[in-house]
Amino acid sequence: MARFLRDEQVSNLTIDPEILSELVDVFANRKNTMPQNNKHANQSIDAFLNYTIRFDQKGYKILNKEQFLQYFLQATDVERLVFEFDSIDAIETNRAVGSFIDLRLDKNENVACFLTVASDDEDWVNGSFSAIKETLIKCKNRHSWVRNPYVYFLVQGTGIFLGFLVSLWGASKIAPMLIIENSFLISFLLVLLVFSNLWTPINQRLRIIVNRAFPIIKFYRPDKDRLHWLYQAIVGGIVVVLSLYCLGIAFTYVGKMLGAFVGGSGT
């Protein structure tokens, strides 16, 4: 490991084409101030700077800024960005000495995103780390406000309340078909029992949806992602309407079935 090192986990960032271009420029500038420049002044290549982008289940390692931005803009779903800078000494010694920088950004919440800078020169480490951090601060978002236990508690409470309303609605559909004492209460408890057993997997799915809507790292292309959100909203609205319609039919069917067993109005 190099003598001086600074690293930090990064999160709650929105990476757009402008920020991406600025990050590439910052990495290029740090190459020009690398402490090994004097040592390798006679060599045509004194360091390697490359970028990796994974999108649409494919990955590419790139050396060119323009191509990097082109892939970012044309991708349907950007999954990961990696910036890697290694001096010749770092490559030859497997980063035991020399200078290197790693910046890894991944929208998968199970993958740690981090910035690492190391070198034999402490000033270069501090300068590089600060320069990249200044750029990352510009793209900080407020997703941490959503990804917290209080929001999950709110989702839990809202789900329970909606489950109560659905149970009342279901009971109003089922009870008229039953000729028994306290038919509404029995129908309500029956629907509530079914909902309570379904709520755990539903709640888990809702958490996944919230985390995907507000990821730790968000890759944003204005022309594509804005329309993508509109498409998701339309599809989501259609799904909700169809789900309520199907539930209404299901409650009516259950009421008829129960009425046939315990005695009903026959309608």
Image (spheres, rainbow, N blue to C red):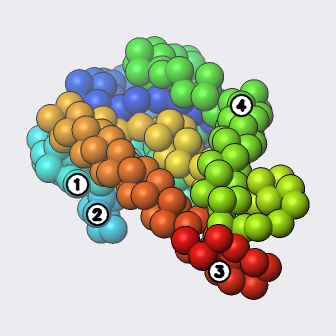
Q: Residue at x 28, y 44 (%)?
A: 234
Nearer to me, 70 or 204 = 204
Disc 2 to disc 3: CB gap under 8 Å: no
For badge 3, the amino acid type reads Met
Give the mark, 2 or 3, whose residue is nearer the N terminus: 2
Residue 81 visible, this orientation = yes
Give the mark, 2 or 1, whose residue is nearer the N terminus: 2
Q: Which residue is mark 1?
A: 76
Residue placed furthest toward the right:
181
Distance between mark 2 and mark 3 Cα atoms? 48 Å
Give the mark, 3 or 1, whose residue is nearer the N terminus: 1
Disc 2 to disc 1: CB gap under 8 Å: yes
- Assign the C terminus to one quadrant of the image: bottom right
Q: Which residue is mark 3?
A: 257
Of tags 2 and 3, which is closer to the observer? 3
Distance between mark 2 and mark 4 Cα atoms? 34 Å
Residue 34 visible, this orientation = no
